[in-house]
Amino acid sequence: MIQTVYEQFSAAAKKSPELTFLCYPPSDDRGYLSSGAEFSYGNSLDLIDSLAIRYIEAGFVAGHRVGLLLGNLPDHFWHLLALNSIGASVVPLNPAYLDHELEYAIKFANCALIVTTADRVGDLNRVCLSMSPQVSVFGINAKENTIPRPTCNAETIPSAKGDREALIIYTSGTTGRPKGCIISNTSCLAAGESYGEAGGLINFEAGKDRLYIPLPAFHMNVSVYTLNTTTRLRNCIVLQDRFRASTWWSDIYYTKATCLHYMGIIPPLLIKSERSQYENSHKIKFGQGAGVDPVVREEFETRFGFPLIEAWGMTETSRAIQNCRLPRDPAGRAFGYPRAPLEVLVVDESDRPVPFSTPGELLVRCAGDNPRHGFFSGYLKQPEETEKVWRLGWFHTGDVVTQREDGMLSFVDRKKNIIRRSGENIAAAEVEEALIEDSKIKSVAVLATKDEFHDEEIHACIVLMPNSDASELTAKSIFDFGRSRLITYKLPGWISFVDKIPVTGTQKIRKDAIFPKDFNLKQDVNSFDMRGFKRKKVVKNE
């Protein structure tokens, strides 16, 4: 019986050693992989097993944690699987972390070693050698090939392999310190089973599919959800280090990808990019992701010829819900029907169930005696935060959704992205969805801003297409465009033109980082007050 991430990979490699495990498209800035590369299951297993022996010889045992700062290199997976095979866990680190962020992530997880590329050894030494106790750094390309001994003791671990920690994944929260989610082997395997058995439009074929993913390996999507789905089915991960509109279709064409992952910001950028000679020569069956607005989705599918399947999931839940049932329900931001063993409940702020089609917070749990089975094991060193989100036996997601009588769930917004204007709850996502249709807009993020009359007002932050100017006339044109798609109180009260909308390493918009802390909306020359236009009545010709 397979109980760990490594055991699942090993079984796949022994059954089909010739199949491709990892594929990399060409990339000018990826060192030895610049011309592209493929790695088979059999060869990867040999590398992983020999690496595990080296870890054992260095003194690593079950319960040690090792930080990995390896980007999307194949070494990330080899070290992850080697450590998993001996019962140790990994802490994937964001390569974009600043020194103080690295120090926090390493110390908080009690890492016994950091593994990185040769070009980052100096950066990591600067951080790790100043810590007390010091943490050793191992460069995978260094001349000295001996893995250093662990610099701290191993953690106490459960006797059952499935309950043992496989990863600590830091959430990409935009405020405060990120939480460390403890992900067990059981949670990893549950993620692979959930995605691999979704069915309908998600029609994986064992040993045949190649999944293209332009997301970072330090994220849950790659290192848990995709890795375990792929190895469960003996399929291939096609890995790009980040989203590149210029090479997206050529990557997919040359790597023979059959399915892909996207984030909400990707489809509109592809639609607005120049046509590629490869965009209709692909073999893609489906794309899965989250956050694409329905209008963009329809245009994308018409132009590129495959369905975008909206899904919902979190680092904490491992399993996902996808709108993949045939025939597919095209309703708005629908993301699917809950599938066993997941159960869902939609509640108000007092945790009371709300009527069908009424917005409320999504709660989820596993059916049966253990509602936490397959979920994360808790927040590292924060038991009170763990119990807070698990109150009443349900995991509280912080997402606002609606549910129809037939069970279909639709996304409204994160609770923190709900704007409260004069007693009305307005989802930032709804406003963003309406405005992005304007051909002048490249990307948009909607915030809440304090307002002396309405408590909060809608603030649209817009990156314009190159041929549009950041003027009051343009702002008014965008505002008028929104009138045909939004009721008056949902129109932006302020419009700001910005050079870029920052995102996290996992391509989630960082709304807190769009403006500096001392930003003054009313004094900014690229911000325009639309509140007066909201109060004016529009006279329609009869």
Image (cartoon, rainbow, N blue to C red):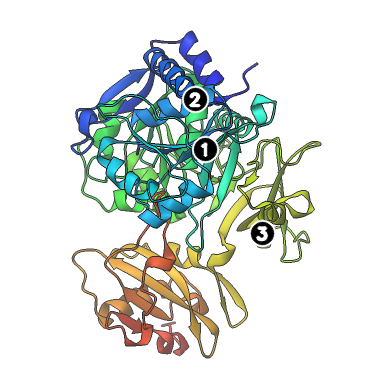
Judge by depth and name the residue closer to the eye, 417 or 407.
417
Q: Evaluate whether residue 435 shows in this view.
A: no
Inspect the image, locate mark 1, and give the three-letter code of the amino acid beneath it.
Cys
Q: Earlier in the sequence, mark 3 or mark 1?
A: 1
Q: What's under tag 2, amino acid-wise?
A: Gly
Report the disc number at residue 321: none
- Report if the CB atoms under discs 2 and 3 are less than 8 Å apart: no
- Relative to the observer, which residue lies in front, 362 or 114? 114
Cα separation, mark 2 vs mark 3, equals 47 Å
- Name the quarter where the N terminus is drawn: top right
Which-is-in-front pick, marks 3 and 1? 1
Do labels 3 and 1 touch, CB within 8 Å? no
Q: Please, is residue 510 above or below residue 14 in the view?
A: below
Q: Secondary structure at mark 2?
A: loop
Q: Residue 443 placed where, x, y %? A: 34, 61
State the CA–CA distance, disc 3 to disc 1: 41 Å
Q: Nearer the viewer, residue 136 or 83?
A: 136
Q: CA distance from mark 1 to mark 2?
A: 11 Å
Which amino acid, by three-letter code, is at mark 3?
Answer: Glu
Q: Earlier in the sequence, mark 1 or mark 2?
A: 2
- Relative to 405, residue 89 above or below: above
Q: Quadrant of residue 329?
A: top right
Residue 161 visible in the picture? yes
Vertical side of 266 occupied by 453: above or below: below
Instruction: Kindly identify which residue carries mark 1.
Output: 152
Q: Residue at position x 39%, y 42% from top? A: 216
Question: Is the C terminus in the top left, top right, bottom left or bottom right quadrant?
Answer: bottom left
Label 3 secondary element: strand
Residue named by callout 3: 361
Q: Which residue is mark 2?
A: 59
